[in-house]
Amino acid sequence: MAGVMELDVTRHGAVGDGKTLNTGSLQGAIDGLHARGGGVLRFPAGRYLTGSLRLKSGVMLYLEEGLCCWGALRLTIIRSSVRKKN
């Protein structure tokens, strides 16, 4: 898309391994694109684990073939991931 900012989630720290909790990096990418006036957030193939995300106006999601996005519904998963990073 000519003239539209694109951001690959893996360049913003997301890891599609099905184990890494990506909520912070994904929300940061959404917030960053929104602050710049919007754009396309590209998800390459992989398994992305995330908690709740807040989508914002002007940010479009492009989901490539082979993408699985897993929701971390249990707070214990989110808390244990945060503890491992500290």
Image (cartoon, grey):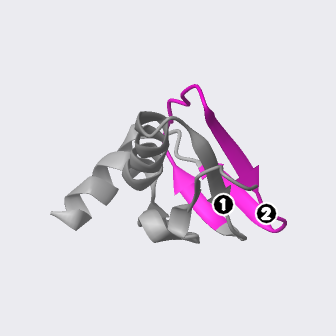
Mark 1: amino acid: Phe
Which residue is located at x 41 percent, y 50 percent?
A: 77
The image shows residue 68, relative to residue 71, as above or below, that is: below
Question: What is the magenta range?
Answer: 47-70
Q: Is residue 60 above or below residue 66?
A: above
Where is residue 52? Give x, y as percent: 50, 35
Contact between labelled residues 1 and 2, with CB atoms less than 8 Å apart: yes
Residue kind at label 2, given as amino acid type: Glu
Q: Is residue 53 magenta?
A: yes
Residue drawn at (44%, 48%) of the image: 23
From the top left corner, tell me how far across and down residue 81 is, in percent. Answer: 33, 58
**Can you identify the residue that label 2 sits on?**
64
Q: Quadrant of residue 35?
A: top left
Q: Position of residue 79 (x, y in %)?
A: 30, 48
Quarter of the N terminus within the rendering: bottom right
Instruction: Identify residue for label 1.
Output: 43
In the displayed structure image, the side of residue 39 where residue 19 appears, left or right: left
**Which residue is the extreme one toward the right?**
65
Check the image and report above or below for 56 versus 39: above
Answer with left or right where residue 5 lies relative to residue 52: right
| Residue 13: image tag | none
Residue farthest top in this picture: 57
The x and y percentages for residue 67 are 75, 63
